[in-house]
Amino acid sequence: THTASYTLSLHDALPILFSGTNSTLGLDTEDAVVKTIDIQGVDALLVKKGTAAQVAWADEIQQIYIVIDGPIDQTEDLIKIARNLTVS
């Protein structure tokens, strides 16, 4: 079983990891506002930095990372997209 975990690294980048693998997705969180939100029953990260926003999470079943990004003024739309996204 692979578990997604969120940990801070040395250079203010927040990696999302699948335990037991060498796969990592790093998110730039330096001087950013980072919040955990629920996306389809999974803890996802909402990162707001400058004029940009990102919603990122790991799909443990398919072992993929999903990042949706866009302008910060469309953050609610990004969250809606993430909550309604179907990956097959």
Image (cartoon, grey):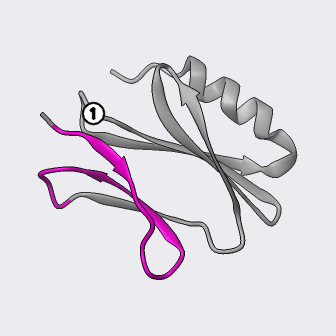
Q: Which residue is identified by label 1?
A: 60
Q: Quadrant of the N terminus?
A: top left
Q: Quadrant of the C terminus?
A: top left
Q: Is residue 61 above or below residue 67?
A: above
Q: Nearer the viewer, residue 33 or 26?
A: 33
Q: Is residue 41 magenta?
A: no
Q: Is residue 15 magenta?
A: yes
**x, y (%) of residue 20?**
12, 51
Residue found at x 78% / y 32%: 76
Residue count near mark 1 (Cα–Cα under 10 Å), binned few <14, some 14–19, many ≥20: some
Give the residue type at disc 1.
Answer: Glu
Q: Which residues are magenta?
A: 2-22
Q: Secondary structure at mark 1?
A: loop
**x, y (%) of residue 55?**
60, 43
Q: In the drawing, does residue 33 fall left or right of residue 3?
A: right
The single residue placed furthest to the bottom in the displayed view is 11
Where residue 61 sits, quadrant-wise, is top left
Residue found at x 24% / y 38%: 63
**x, y (%) of residue 19?**
19, 50
Where residue 9 sits, quadrant-wise, is bottom left
Where residue 48 sits, quadrant-wise, is bottom right
Q: Is residue 87 above or below residue 78?
A: above
Residue found at x 31% / y 41%: 64
Residue found at x 58% / y 17%: 84
Q: In the drawing, does residue 82 fall left or right of residue 66?
A: right
